[in-house]
Image (spheres, rainbow, N blue to C red):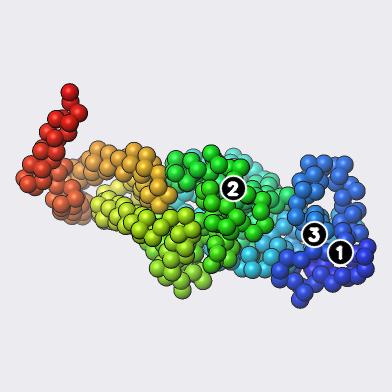
Amino acid sequence: MKRTITAALSLAAGAVAFGQAAMGQAIALPNISDITRECVDCHQKADPGLYQQWGTSTHYRANVGCYECHNADKRDPDAFDHYGNTISVLVTPKDCARCHSREVEEFAGSHHSKAGRILGSLDNVLAEVVEGNKGLHTMAFTEGVSAAAVNGCWQCHGSEIKVLAGGKLDPATYPNSGIGRINPDGTEGSCNACHTRHDFSVAQARHPDTCGKCHLGPDHPQKEIYEESKHGINFFSKINDMNLDNEKWIVGEDYWAAPTCATCHMSATKTQSVTHDIGMRISWNNRPAVSVRPEVSDAKMGLPGANVPWQVRRQNMKDVCLNCHETQWVENFYVQYDGLVDLYNTKFAKPGLELMALAKPLMKPTAFANKIDWTWFELWHHEGRRARHAAAMMAPDYTHWHGTYEIARNFYSEFIPELEELVERASHASDPSKVKAAEALQAKIDEILNTDDHKWYLGKMDPSEQAARKQAAEDFKKRYDK
């Protein structure tokens, strides 16, 4: 356990207790401690950039410095002696909780803090095995580890910090500011994922570019989605009106030009306090192949949000929206959003999962050893997420051309034909179980393709709908073909 700062620090203005019992909320010290002054005397010369960053911070103005954050107990696995003082390089959520207990408690209950648990997921199988090898050797990984995982997945999701002799940190696991970093003291998370050290700027944490360190790219392009949305357009055109460094920063009161990621998911409104649990305003979890309500995924992870129903979370978000939009706008938005999630779940995700389950006996048993593994993975993990996230944040191009269009194109031109190839190949197998599995898969393909959602593919569109579509096409030509 990191030891608390006590009166023994001999603060210049007199002894001030800074112990665990006195802590819980951020406070200011009357003076910079003598030990921190010693740190500053050296690091001002050795690390001038860090010194300048700290000098612009609220910590500096509160006389909170190097030692107040980096002090350690000799029993800590990452503790080491540094010119007579016991410190550690890592500053973990447990350390931050000395002054920011409420924020840390909320963060610990969030999905952000659990991001490091990706280490056993399909994503990490890709980085460790499919993309990588064991060519990176360190003291903690004598058998080797994948540089693709170290430099990719772990830098956003967080590594499991490995401590070497003398409090040194294994280079495969540090430096790392992944938001779900697994720390030697048992905590999960890294506060400086969003509050970059050593200035810990609140303005930076509120800026959408900060979230873009991780929330971008083919599988969760929230940053790109935000930039396309009217919210993002307003933000970047009116950034000087955003008041990002204001301490209070209540939407509709301290700013009204546009919301940022923080506005919607974390920051204060006139009726809500700041929260560091980013799931408390989310009414769908769009990470899985099939969207689920957030309390369902919270329950699986053992998070306190399991007891907070999605209706409460949605009302929390509506409270944010209503600072700029009127009730009809907000209610109608959610009708549109829910409709897109339902479309994706019903037409593609649930049938896809059923088909993949029936296809398993006809496939190579190793994940990603089959072409269809990649096709299905990208359908839900890339295109499916893009469509759902984009609808949630109102980016039409990402919803359609990067989302539902690509889902449909790959479902009909790749996924279904690849399933039919598996059926054809297994139909002639000498193994009766393979033939039976092929028959079951073909029956399910036929069943799904003959539903109202998919029968157009078989040329079985309802005649009345076909006639209506023909009439609409003719009306379009009359209007525009001149």
- Answer few, some or many: residues within 10 Å of disc 1's Cα (few below 14, many 20 plus, some between 14 and 19): some
What distance separates the C-alpha of mark 3 from that of mark 2?
Answer: 25 Å
Q: Count numbered badges in the picture.
A: 3
Q: Is residue 471 left or right of residue 173?
A: left
Q: Which residue is denoted by mark 2 in the rendering? A: 242
Secondary structure beneath dot 2 equals loop
303 in relation to 44, above or below: below
- Image mark for residue 30: 1
- Image coordinates of residue 387 in percent, x first then y, are 36, 47
- Image quadrant for the N terminus? bottom right
- Of the two numbered discs 3 and 2 in the rendering, the one whose residue sits closer to the viewer: 2
- Image mark for residue 358: none
Q: Earlier in the sequence, mark 3 or mark 1?
A: 1
113 in relation to 41, above or below: below
- Image coordinates of residue 127 in percent, x first then y, are 50, 44
Q: Earlier in the sequence, mark 3 or mark 2?
A: 3
330 in relation to 130, above or below: below
